[in-house]
Amino acid sequence: MTEIAWQQKDLLSIADLSAAEIQLVLDTASSFREVSARPVKKVPTLRGKTVINLFFEPSTRTRSSFEIAEKRLSADSLNFSASSSGLVKGESLVDTALNLQAMAPDLIVIRHGHPGVPRMLAERVSAGVINAGDGAWGHPTQALLDAFTIREEKGKLEGLKVAMVGDIAHSRVVRSNIELLNTMGAEVTVAGPRTMMPVAVETLGVRAVYSLEEAIRGADVVMMLRVQLERHKKVMFPSVREYFQLFGLTRERLRSAKRDAIVMHPGPMNRGVEIASDVADGSRSVILEQVANGVAVRMAVLYLLSGARQEAGA
Amino acid sequence: MTLLIRNGRVVDPSQALDETLDVLIQDGVVKRLAAAIKPPGKAEVVDATDLVVAPGLIDMHVHLREPGFEYKETVESGTRAAAAGGFTAVACMPNTRPVNDNRSVTEHIVGEAERHGYARVYPIGAVTKGEKGEELAEYGDMVAGGVVALSDDGLPVANSEAMRRALLYSRHYDLAVIQHAEDPTLGPDGVMHEGEFSTRLGLPGLPGAAEDAMVARDLLLVEDNGGRYHVAHLSTARSLELVKLAKDRGLSVTCEVTPHHLLLTDRDVLESGLSTHTKMKPPLRSEADRLALVEGLADGSIDVIASDHAPHHADEKDVEFSLAPFGIVGLETTLALCLDRLVRPGLISLSRLVEVLAVNPARVLGVAGGTLKEGSVADVTLFSLSRQMTVNASRFRSKGRNTPFDGWKLRGRPVSTFIAGRHVVV
Ligand SMILES: [Zn+2]
């Protein structure tokens, strides 16, 4: 394993991590992947530690992934969600933070609709805080699991051509992935309808194009993004049919990528909107590997943050 | 009552004056400006050696929050803040509860101001009833109560027909119509300037074009219908170009900028870690916009610096960035910021600063003051160019502590104010 120590109290943003720290998370995740392959999928690493999963936005996928990771590490975990908990209903964020602090958890995993909230929380609690998605700003564990998956498939990140296609403006997955891939030396191209492309997108350090073919030409990795139908259908594009015509990934279109290009999707997928079923289920797709790797990467993050806390406390 | 302000550097652009003089004030009026005036018998003497003596500063864009939001600010706390910041007068926006769209609210504000006496208060009346952007408010009645200008600030007069009628009808009273220029349909969910940093943060943007489009529309309406039009808190390079164009065409158009738009940019939203003290409307713009505003201030195309003092309770601001209310306080930082960051580095002259903080606001509002000419009302601000201060929000006289400038070390600061020759004690 890489010989650097983990120093960070929190995982709030990929931008806070150096290349070496990203490597450390990925290397640590490699060793945890093996745990998930055992008949008894449990190690005592976080026994006696309390982890609170605080989800202000519904997210079955990310939350289950964290929960499984916590259970496999033997942590005591509990869930608060905005809909079920009086703790967060109608209460200010500051009060929520004070209440959480009083419960003295070791780690808090937070998902929130407003960017910056995990950082606000981290400043107010002594627990380590893991950002599980804040607004359209960041989703660092998603970027880490994507990187882990790419590295498993391609053996490296540096020098790879990665295309991300879809709603670039409103995607936290995109922002965190761009930060990570740029740090690790990959080349990123983004594409999507002009109405879903943020202004000054190039300042993120990417190439922006406006056709699917151009985006994925020669790509090693094609990452399709979820179209948030419920939110954007009305205003951002005229119809699902037209979206699929312009930016849906079909087997035919995938031909312009490298022969061994992999297809990724952070989920949940809209089949027939951003991706055709035969591509999603095809041999190039690593979408389910992403889900499996997500658990290992989150175990790694939980482990590293709790370790950092122990050292800080000693 | 007689007052002699001695040996100060009198800076009064209204009479192209910048020299060391004594100012003799009698019965609330400037009696004489001259070197080495011999103090009359019972005169109170103020030594202004090493200080600047300027016409009383006027902040023509503040929110005093009374009536209705006294937990944020009152006429008393807001005018104390004004006095502490070197202002002898403020013009207060009508977005109170109830809205200042009728004489009784106007008179309440004026009455409170007189009772406390820290600064003159010039109420700005609503353009439309309830600031709803539809029917005109009763301008004549409000003028009788003390209103000096019109605005629906907080909101734009978005409806073009309502704006046209306001421009026409305001001409009967020669009132400036002050527009919060923002097309509300463009970037409706925006919380910060749309640009590089909104893209990085994934926050919905407020495009500069929303301001530009509204300014452009209004200028066309002014060209056709007359009226005196004033752009509140102008924040983009393009809006400034439009204003210049309108001035070249001879329209009666003026504009103001805030210190924060002159000193901060959208980068500060990111670098402050999404501090809600960087959230206001119009939002902190790009560096290119900021530079254009500084240039416009220097070349004379910007008429006024106003703070857009917008106090909020700490609990309201200590929330998620996207949920926090827009606005920051400014009365107690404006002068010092301008002295340290604009005058000291030589971006503008001291006399230009006094022009935009005193002479021009008086002219736009059509009120007394803004000059120390003999015979004019003796509203005076004394300030120092060399004394230092560190902004300390916890010690503000304002109830609002929502400032992005907390902790800034500044050279140059207000010293005292006089209203009609009476020393204001805060
Ligand atoms: Zn305004």
Image (tube, coloured by chain):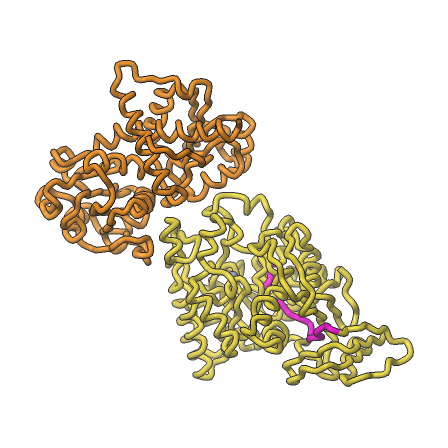
| Marker count (numbered) | 0
Report the residue that reaches farthest toward the right: B41
Is B376 situated above or below A229?
A: below
Q: Quadrant of the N terminus of chain A?
A: top left
A155 to the left or right of B65: left
**Percent position of residue A224, x then y:** 22, 42
Residue A281 rendering spot, x and y as whole percentages: 14, 33
Q: Residue at x 27, y 35 (%)?
A: A148
Residue A103 is situated, as x and y percent measured from the top left of the image, at: 53, 25
In the foreground, B256 or B197: B197
Residue A227 seen in the current view:
yes
Q: Residue at x 91, y 79 (%)?
A: B41
Q: Colour of chain A?
A: orange
- Is residue B24 shown left or right of residue B152? right
Magenta span has B379?
no
Q: Position of residue B303 (x, y in %)?
A: 54, 75
Output the letter for the chain in yellow. B
- Residue B54 belongs to magenta span: yes
**Prevailing secondary structure of the magenta residues:** strand
Q: Which residues are magenta?
A: B50-63
The residue drawn where x is 27% and y is 47% is A185
Image side of residue B120 versus residue B360, left or right: right
